[in-house]
Amino acid sequence: MLISQIKNDQGGISVVVRNGAEASIIQGVESSYALVRKAIAAKTSIANCVREHTLGPAVDLEVLAEQNRILLPIHHDDPAHMHLTGTGLTHLGSASTRDAMHNKNAADTSEMTDSMRMFQMGLESGKPAAGKVGVQPEWFYKGNGTAAVAPGHALKSPAFADDGGEEPEIAGVYVVGDTGTVHRVGFALSNEFSDHVMERVNYLYLAHSKLREASFGPEIFVGELPADIRGTSSIVRNGKTIWSKPFLSGEDNMSHTIANLEHHHFKYELFRQPGDIHVHMFGTATLSFADKIACEDGDEFVISAPEFGMPLRNPLQLPRKSETLTTVEVL
C-alpha cells in the first residue's frame, strides 16, 4: 500500500491510496496526518483504517506530477512539529564513498580515519540480536518542516553554500502519539540534499553541511521495509541524463538494523513529543559528488525504486545573490 497527498481540484488536500496500478482518493480524510492520528486513536493499522473509508474517484498520479500537484506525502500544519534528521555511514560501501569524498586523506593509510572507525563500529555492533541495543550511528539534524520540499519543487541552495548535491536515501516516517509512543507510518524515498564541498573542508563541518532543504515522497510505502532495495539515482541536465548510478538500501545492504537506528533516534525524550512528525533518513553509499560531478542550476535529481511508487524528482536552484551578513538586533 502506498499513501500520498495531492492538491485537489478545489485547491485543498486529498489523500490518495494506491494498491498496484490504481490510485484512488480516500473520502472523508483531510490529510495523511489526520489518517494516521485516526489509526493511532483506534489502535489499528493504517491499512485497516483505510479500509474503513470509502474510496472516491481514481486519479492519475503521473499526470498530477506533471501539473506539479503532488504534495509532501505527510505534513504538519505547524512546521515546527516536523523534524528532518538522518544517520550516516550506515550502508555497506558508505565508508569508502565518504573517504573518496574526503580525498585529501586518501594518501595517508597509516591510520584509520574517524569515518572508517565509525563504519567499523557499525559492522561489528550495528545489528544486535532482537531486543538488544547496538552501537549508535553517526547522527545529524537537517531542520524542521520549513526545510521539507515537496516532490517536483526546487531544492534551493543558500547563498553561503559551497555546493548542493543529492543523497538518495530511504526515510522512515513517524508520528508520535498522545502518550509519547512512536508510531512508524512507513517508508519513503528521500533526497537528503547536502553541501559536500563544505563537508570536505573538515569533517567537523558536517553539521553545517546538513542544514539544508530535503525532499521525500512522493508516496509512503506502508509496511515493513524490504530487506533488499535496488534503486537508481540520476541527474538530468537540459533533458539529458549526465550521471546515473544504482543505489542499494534495506538491511541486507546496511551495517545497522532499522530497529537500531530507530532506537538511537527516539531514545531522546526530545523526539518523543506528542503529535510530532519525524522523517528520519537512513543514509546512502551513492553520491554523484564522489564521482566528481558538479551539479549546476536547473539540474534535476531523480531518485527511484520500484517498491516506492513514483520517482522523487527535484530540480536544483542555486543562489543568485552573494551572501550578506546576518545581523542580530540587541533588545
Image (cartoon, rainbow, N blue to C red):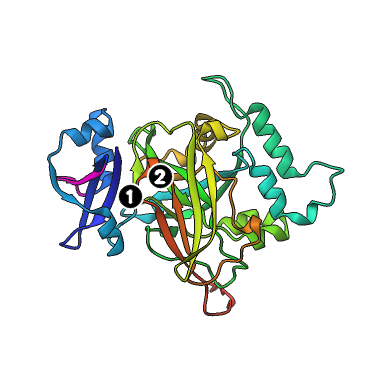
Residue 176 bears which disc, if any? none
Q: Residues within 10 Å of mark 1 (few under 14, many from 20)?
A: many
Q: In which quarter of the image is the N terminus?
A: top left
Report which residue position mark 2 lands on.
188
Q: For mark 1, give the secondary structure.
A: loop
Is residue 128 visible to us here? yes
In the rendered view, tell whether residue 237 sits above or below residue 56.
Answer: below
CA distance for labels 1 and 2: 9 Å
Q: Quadrant of the rendered structure where residue 87 is?
A: top right
Magenta-drawn segment: 21-30
Left or right: residue 42 compared with residue 298: left
Residue at 59% across / 53% down in the picture?
Answer: 287
- In the foreground, 213 or 314: 314
Q: Magenta stretch: residue 273 in it?
A: no
Report which residue position mark 1 lands on.
73
Q: Position of residue 256 (x, y in %)?
A: 58, 32
